Image (cartoon, rainbow, N blue to C red):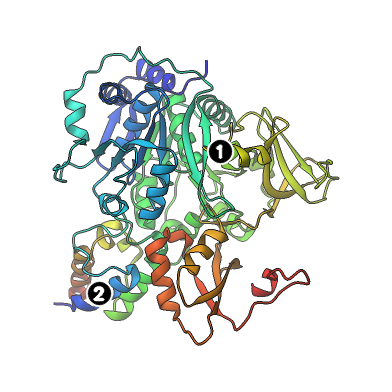
């Protein structure tokens, strides 16, 4: 059996006094995490939360979220780590889409939670991570109080199977609404086991966790530390000086970062290049392509550190990695398949492409999700013949190295998030002045591509860029807000009367 | 004393929210994201004629309006 909940129990038996999770001044050992998560698990069971129920987490990085995830896994329930950048609309949508029964909220996020007003949903228990907030409502609890008052008996009632869902990860869908990707215990277990072998993780590792647990890569880091008995350092602030301080003071050995985070670390106000990082064994870069220019800068600042580029989609966790030894030889490639994974490139007739020919990337083997939550019809398009049809375009070279070539469905990657142009367009169409709106990804000044919105106004009406941006700020997570707004009298069209997006870049 | 209203107005414009509590962490509360950091720094440097050193780029200094004011006042004295 490949159960995630057993990883923590195993490490708490082997390394009871060892630091498991750190966040700022807070430090918890393996036995403390095990004890607190048993208490929370017993509390949840006593409040009617059982195997298969959905539990939401909406907070900033902290030590408690690790306890919550561990407790949910112990009772065979399913955790949904809600992207901390979500606004009230997306939060409400996720709560109702997967019928969340319990929601954990921290003080900073309580404002958005109150605005979301999920009164009519199935939500029947709210647990506040801060004791600063008043409790005048039924079914609201304080985390610290319930931990103290609950028992730490072993959980025996809820039998968990490796094929049970452990989490649902929400990501933008091409229709504009987020899709929940089901991730089982076995997928997390296999991905943890295989990536820990590739990255040679051990109990002496201390990984910094900067990206939120709404990224599968961040969860993989957490479970990897549980598997090997290492330490996870939760990084609350994304300010460059704060990250640099943590890297040095906490003697970080492994660092997973999306290119937009490198953008923050390499910009002119960052002290990143002023320091040495002798403990930093590896960095892994995932989420978007990082131009070679920046790879070279990172390597010059971190001469003793191994750089792993990785590629994957949340529907199949991780597909390929570029071994550090190949970085100078094949810097544009995203590498070779992970052990137990097969990658092929197919054309529209499902025929295998020749080397160098661009087609759809197909993933076969371990890590494949059972499908989308509540959307079986969408699942059949993507999950077929025991494979995942990723919707990504790519090509393979003669040596079997993969090169990523964009999305088939026009989806964009921004700050590591999959972003649907349609979702932003929907938001723009809510403005009565907007007659037509097209959203595209345009090259940015630094590493990131920028979101550009092209607007055609209704006859006789006008709207300012400022009003459009304000509207988007109210409705969308920050990473979806267009950086450039361009007004046009009409949109360029192709012969088939489709908008010619290439002419808009 | 610095003109806090200007800073307040700028943050209102950036976040599209009026009357944000000066002790609320703008980043953790979902008002601002890490992408706003550069804009914020440029505004402070220009408006108050300061040069922020790399070591000032912390959430402690720039997370809340109160702390921004504290940092700006401290830097104005030593300017």
The percent position of residue A208, horizontal first and vertical second, equals 41, 41
Q: Name the residue: 41% across, 52% down.
A: A90
Q: Is residue B28 in view from this perspective?
A: yes
Q: Which residue is mark 1?
A: A372
Q: Is residue A446 in view from this perspective?
A: no
Q: Which mark is residue A352?
A: none
Looking at this view, name the residue that lies furthest to the top.
A156
Q: Nearer the viewer, residue A234 or A384?
A: A384
Both marks 1 and 2 on one chain = no
Q: Is residue A317 left or right of residue A67?
A: right
The percent position of residue A286, horizontal first and vertical second, equals 56, 47
Circle 1 or circle 2, nearest the eye: 1
Q: Nearer the viewer, residue A189 or A99?
A: A99
How many marks the image carries: the answer is: 2
Q: Circle 1: is it few (<14), some (14-19), or many (20+) Cα within 10 Å? A: many
Q: Is residue A504 left or right of residue A425?
A: right
Q: Circle 2: is it few (<14), some (14-19), or many (20+) Cα within 10 Å? A: some
Q: Chain of mark 2?
A: B
In the rendered image, which quarter contains the C terminus of chain A?
bottom right
Q: Which residue is mark 2?
A: B7
Task: Give the secondary structure at mark 2.
Answer: helix
Residue A290, quarter of picture:
bottom right
The percent position of residue A221, horizontal first and vertical second, equals 47, 35
**Above-or-below relation of A120 to A417:** above
Looking at this view, name the residue that lies furthest to the bottom.
A460
Q: Nearer the viewer, residue A290 or A201?
A: A290
Q: Name the residue: 53% across, 81% down.
A: A458
The percent position of residue A362, horizontal first and vertical second, equals 72, 40
Task: Give the secondary structure at mark 1.
Answer: loop
Whole-number angstrom distance, CA of label 1 to CA of label 2: 45 Å
């Amino acid at each position: 059996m490949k159960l995630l909940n057993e990883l923590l129990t195993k490490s708490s038996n082997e390394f009871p006094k060892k630091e498991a999770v750190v966040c700022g001044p807070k430090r918890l050992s393996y036995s403390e995490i095990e004890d607190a998560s048993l208490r929370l698990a017993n509390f949840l069971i006593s409040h009617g939360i059982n195997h298969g129920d959905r539990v939401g987490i909406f907070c900033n990085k902290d030590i408690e979220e690790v306890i919550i995830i561990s407790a949910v896994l112990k009772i065979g329930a399913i955790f949904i780590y809600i992207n901390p950048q979500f606004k009230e609309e997306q939060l409400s949508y996720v709560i109702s889409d997967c019928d969340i029964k319990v929601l954990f909220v921290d003080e900073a996020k309580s404002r958005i939670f109150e605005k979301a007003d999920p009164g009519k949903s199935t939500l029947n228990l709210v647990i506040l991570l801060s004791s600063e907030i008043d409790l005048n409502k039924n079914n609201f609890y304080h985390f610290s109080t319930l931990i103290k008052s609950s028992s730490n008996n072993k959980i025996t009632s809820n039998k968990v199977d490796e094929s049970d869902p452990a989490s649902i990860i929400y990501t933008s869908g091409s229709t504009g609404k987020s899709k929940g990707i089901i991730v089982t215990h076995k997928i997390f277990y296999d991905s943890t086991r295989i990536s820990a072998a590739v990255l040679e993780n051990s109990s002496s590792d201390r990984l910094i966790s900067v990206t939120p647990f709404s990224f599968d890569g961040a969860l993989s880091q957490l479970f990897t530390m549980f598997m090997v008995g290492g330490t996870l350092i939760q990084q609350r602030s994304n300010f460059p000086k704060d990250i640099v301080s943590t890297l040095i003071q906490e003697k970080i050995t492994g660092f997973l970062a999306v290119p937009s985070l490198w953008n923050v670390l390499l910009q002119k106000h960052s002290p990143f290049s002023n320091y040495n990082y002798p403990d930093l064994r590896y960095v892994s870069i995932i989420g978007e392509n990082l131009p070679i220019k920046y790879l070279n800068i990172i390597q010059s600042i971190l001469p003793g550190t191994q750089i792993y580029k990785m590629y994957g989609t949340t529907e199949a966790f991780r597909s390929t990695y570029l071994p550090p030894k190949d970085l100078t030889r094949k810097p544009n490639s995203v590498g070779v398949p992970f052990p137990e994974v097969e990658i092929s490139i197919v054309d529209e007739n499902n025929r295998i492409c020749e080397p160098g020919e661009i087609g759809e990337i197909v993933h076969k083997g371990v890590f494949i999700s059972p499908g989308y939550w509540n959307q079986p019809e969408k699942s059949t398009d993507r999950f077929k013949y025991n494979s995942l049809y990723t919707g990504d375009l790519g090509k393979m070279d003669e040596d079997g190295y993969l090169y990523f070539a964009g999305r088939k469905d026009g989806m964009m990657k921004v700050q590591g998030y999959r972003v649907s142009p349609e979702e932003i367009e929907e938001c723009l169409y809510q403005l009565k002045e907007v007659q037509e709106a097209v959203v595209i990804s345009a090259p940015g000044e630094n590493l990131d591509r920028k979101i550009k919105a092209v607007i055609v106004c209704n006859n006789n009406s006008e709207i300012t860029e400022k009003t459009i941006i304000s509207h988007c700020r109210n409705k969308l997570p920050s990473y979806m807000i267009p950086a450039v707004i361009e007004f046009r009298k009409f949109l360029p069209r192709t012969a088939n009367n489709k908008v010619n997006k290439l002419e808009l870049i | 004393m610095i003109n806090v209203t200007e800073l307040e107005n700028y943050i209102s414009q950036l976040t599209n929210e009026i009357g944000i509590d000066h002790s609320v962490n703008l980043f953790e509360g979902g008002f601002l994201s890490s992408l706003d950091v550069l804009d914020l720094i440029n505004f402070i440097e220009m408006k108050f004629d300061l040069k922020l050193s790399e070591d000032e780029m912390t959430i402690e200094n720039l997370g809340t309006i109160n702390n921004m004011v504290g940092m700006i006042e401290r830097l104005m004295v030593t300017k």
